[in-house]
Image: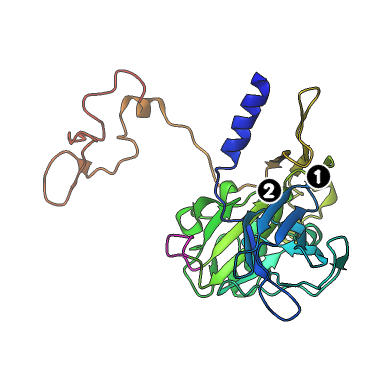
Amino acid sequence: MISRIVLGVLLAAAACFGQAERGTFNGSITDSSGAAVAGANVKIYNMATGVELNAASTEAGVFRAPSLSPGTYRITVAAPGFKTSVRQNIVLAVAQTLTVDFALEVGNLTESVTITAETPLLETGTAEIGSYVTKKEFDEWPIAVGGGRRQIQQFIFTSLPGTTGGTWQGSINGGQNYSHEILIDGISVGRMDLAGGANSEFSPSAESISEFKLQTGTVSAQYSGGQTSVANFATKSGTNEVHGSAYYYGQNDALRANAFNSNAAGIRRQPFKQHNYGYSIGGPVVIPKLYNGKNRSFFFHNFERTTTKDFNQTGFSTLPMPQFQQGDFSQILNAGFTGNAISGTNVGTDALGRPVIGGAMTPRCSTPC
């Protein structure tokens, strides 16, 4: 019993995280004449996880189901005196609000009308403009490798409408470089203009991302900060079946040709080895004899690592001289850099405002600086 209580507390805590990546279904339920049907039972079923939510239509025949994870759903509507209406394979993307209307036919509840395929629904609930990248597209589209790993930020700025630039400088809809907000599962991880580039925490592992939406235009008030756009990522989640992946990307100097200029100068090919590897796994939370999380709770884990051995570096590296560790920098300071306040010389001081006389700090360090 104690184990179940602890698990329940952890699951409840997880539900308190940000919801900005969640989607919403709303719509109206009417009869064949267009009159509102009140009190209709609406069941919303996630076809990947088996999680089912219930809602009901209001007196005006309107229903709303917020805070839904991105995925593929089945919506079933039932009301006394009408045939049960079912819509299958409705794809809800990141931060999307979809309007799904139902016109019920007179009949028995045991009878059903099922729509198994239809054109993609238009998002009419918001004024936002955005670009969706679905899970299938994200898995199949090529993502450039930069810095030893697949760069999602570079993919955004080289593939989606309204974007210009690359990994280290980019603009959306004419805004400042990297002024867009970045959300991962609804949690803000900051703005790119404050990061100074595509750091790891701002560019999650490509293997961990299920889908994302680049939101532009009139951004909803739930996103604060005055940014021009929002990059909204949804990570993969576990399902009722255990699934996972493993991958490796490698570069090796044995498989690389020498540069033309190096060949001309008689310089041999420099050693270079780069390895990018990782894995992901997800499924239902199952504790033998204690808890079966199918249709209820799930886990997902992702790991990625990059190692590089590159000897093709230019420049020099030096070590400090022993006297430097005692505060004596007279060998590298100009002759005019003294503690004498004479016109034409530079007066230097240390962090405490004491003059640097003869290129040495006063008093000398008793221990290495």
Q: Say which amino acid is labelled 2.
A: Ser
Residue 224 magenta-highlighted: yes
Q: Which residues lie in the magenta part? A: 221-228
Horizontal arrangement in the rendering, residue 132 relative to residue 129 (left or right) = right
Q: Say which of marks 2 and 1 sits in front.
A: 2
Sequence-wise, which precedes: disc 2 or disc 1?
A: 2
Q: Residues within 10 Å of mark 1 (few under 14, many from 20)?
A: few
Asked where in the image residue 357 lies, by quadrant, the reply is top left
* In contact (CB < 8 Å): disc 2 and disc 1: no
Q: Say which amino acid is labelled 1.
A: Tyr
Residue 140: horizontal and vertical position, in percent? 81, 60
Mark 1 = which residue? 248
The residue lying toward the viewer, choosing from 40 and 135, is 40
Mark 2 = which residue? 205
| Residue at x-position 86% and y-position 68% | 113
The residue lying toward the viewer, choosing from 190 and 328, is 190
Asked where in the image residue 308 lies, by quadrant, the reply is top right
Is residue 120 among the parts visible in the rendering?
yes
Asked where in the image residue 26 lies, by quadrant, the reply is bottom right
> Where is 9 relative to 255, above or below?
above
